[in-house]
Amino acid sequence: MDSFSKLLRRVSRSAVIVLPFLVSTHTAIAADKLPALGVNLENTSVSGLSSGAFMTSQFYVVNSDIMVGAGVIAGGPYLCAQSYAYQSYMVNATTACMNPLTASVGPNTQMLVSKTKKLSKEKKIDNIDNIKDDKIYIFSGKADHVVATKVVDQTEKFFLDLGVDADSILYNTNVDAGHAIITNNKKDTECDLTKAPFINDCDFEQSHRIIRHIYGDTKPPSEKATGKIIKFDQLEFVDSEYTSMSKHAYAYVPDQCYSQSCNLHVVFHGCLQGADVIGDQYYAGTGYNEIADTNNLVMLYPQVHPSKGKPLNPQGCWDFWGYSLPEESQPDYFTKEAPQIKAVTKMVKRLAQQNVAAQ
Amino acid sequence: MAAGDQSYFELDPKLEKALSRVVETGKTTIENMNVVARAITPFKTFAQINDNTTNFLNSVDWGNVVKNSYLPESYQTPLTQLAEIQQAAIKTTVEGQASFFKTLSTEGKEIASTPVPIEKPQEAMADYIDKSLDLYDDVNEAMKEQASQLNTVQSAYMAWYQNTLQSMSAAPKT
């Protein structure tokens, strides 16, 4: 009996030592695989703030075959960093595309439109005519001095010049908002400030307006998100060394989307807004999930993180000037072959694969 | 000195905190310098600008540029835009410098007038270090802001030059 109790004690001591390892190993691999859900690929849309808005324009234009609309919050037009030949993409990105001295030296939309048409002809992006019947939401806060309204004005002009109907564009410049995504949550930052985590309370849910504008008749959002947030291994989709993309990204799946085909909306956070910096505030606190619940939408939240080495992306922004290809003087950050766009496109395709388990 | 009096051997918590702030500031400065150094890629940048400029200049219709150069109305928009840029550049530069000097003089005066209570030398030192580091941080921020403003001004002139060539390259309005 004595020896048995000794044995028990030894086993329990071992368990104390071994169990945490087992648990921590389990935690380390706790991220799920992004599931195949059979989403309607042809009804995909995208939105984002700031660098996420620039990425939105890129992802939307590149993949216009599958897109029905986009929401650009405080972002410039596609290819903006290529506005002026006499300065580098990075200088263009941080001057002409953010807060240029005057409107006339902001984004060079005439040239950007002609470059876009050329890329479409060369099939480096989807046929740009696809966007003509889409819905576009654009927003610029009156108190935004990071990406000024004179830049965002050119986003509207870019889409109009490419043939999007003026009635299909909802451009709001009336809110006294700082540089932020807007919510109706008193706990968020005051409306007119520009301050981390760049989520401001201006008495309306911007994510809901975006979804309503893109998809038309929508049902009111749920009081509280009831679906499932999936943390998944994002690196599975990354095949390039310097994307600055985080190990994990997130998807929100309403319960009904496991058994029926839903639409997909991709959400790009802004600089200093990835989950590695602000936790779940963007992917769980900006209202997207609540409207997803009642409108059969799956939300995909790809993630980038700050990187002070190589690639140089100290603020964890999405790439709209070429940092993800640090060795190349002509980095392709803007076509189907662009490292970040390619990775997110693969995620979208996975979500569109048929959900065999549900059949 | 009394045996129980340890105050001369113990570091005042305020001074300890101030000293660790010095170390942190040093670390951050080096880190920021490294980031700036990594951002400077002269060969890559030169190649990028060179390629893009060559492509742009090849796309310019020089025949139209010459024709337009004889038409006074071709200069109207570029000159108006240049005037706007110059006004904005002066305003931005003057405001930036004023803010910089204000930061420097206000906080500089505060440091100079800091009283030094002899009876608490460690606390006085902590206070002095804190104020100096506040000044360093604020001057740094002001300098960054000024550099960014100058960058914006320079970029505006470059953009204006390209916009002008682009507009002169269009077929003359008859």
Image: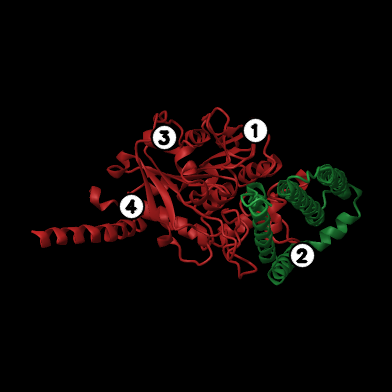
Against B61, residue B100 (above or below) is above
Mark sitting earlier along the chain (4/1): 4
- Labelled pair 3, 1 in contact (Cβ < 8 Å): no
The chain letter under disc 2 is: B
* Residue lying at the far front of the rendered structure: B2
Instruction: Give amino acid for label 2.
Output: Leu
Q: Mark 4 points at which residue?
A: A35
Q: Which chain is red?
A: A
Q: Colour of chain B?
A: green
At label 3, counting other C-alpha atoms closer than 10 Å, the crowd grade (few under 14, some 14-19, many 20 or more) is many
Local SS, label 3: helix
Residue B51 percent coordinates (x, y)? 71, 68
Instruction: Give amino acid for label 4.
Output: Pro
Pick the residue in front: A336 or A339. A339
Instruction: Give amino acid for label 3.
Output: Glu
Spatial CA span between label 3 and label 1: 25 Å
Against B25, residue A198 (above or below) is above
Local SS, label 2: helix
- Nearest to viewer (mark 3 / mark 1): 1
Residue A246 percent coordinates (x, y)? 48, 57
* Residue lying at the far left of the rendered structure: A1
Same chain, labels 4 and 1: yes
Image mark for residue B57: 2
- Nearest to viewer (mark 2 / mark 3): 3
Spatial CA span between label 2 and label 3: 51 Å
Spatial CA span between label 4 and label 2: 49 Å
The image quarter in which residue A252 lies? top left
- Nearest to viewer (mark 4 / mark 2): 4
Q: Name the residue under label 3.
A: A290
Same chain, labels 4 and 2: no
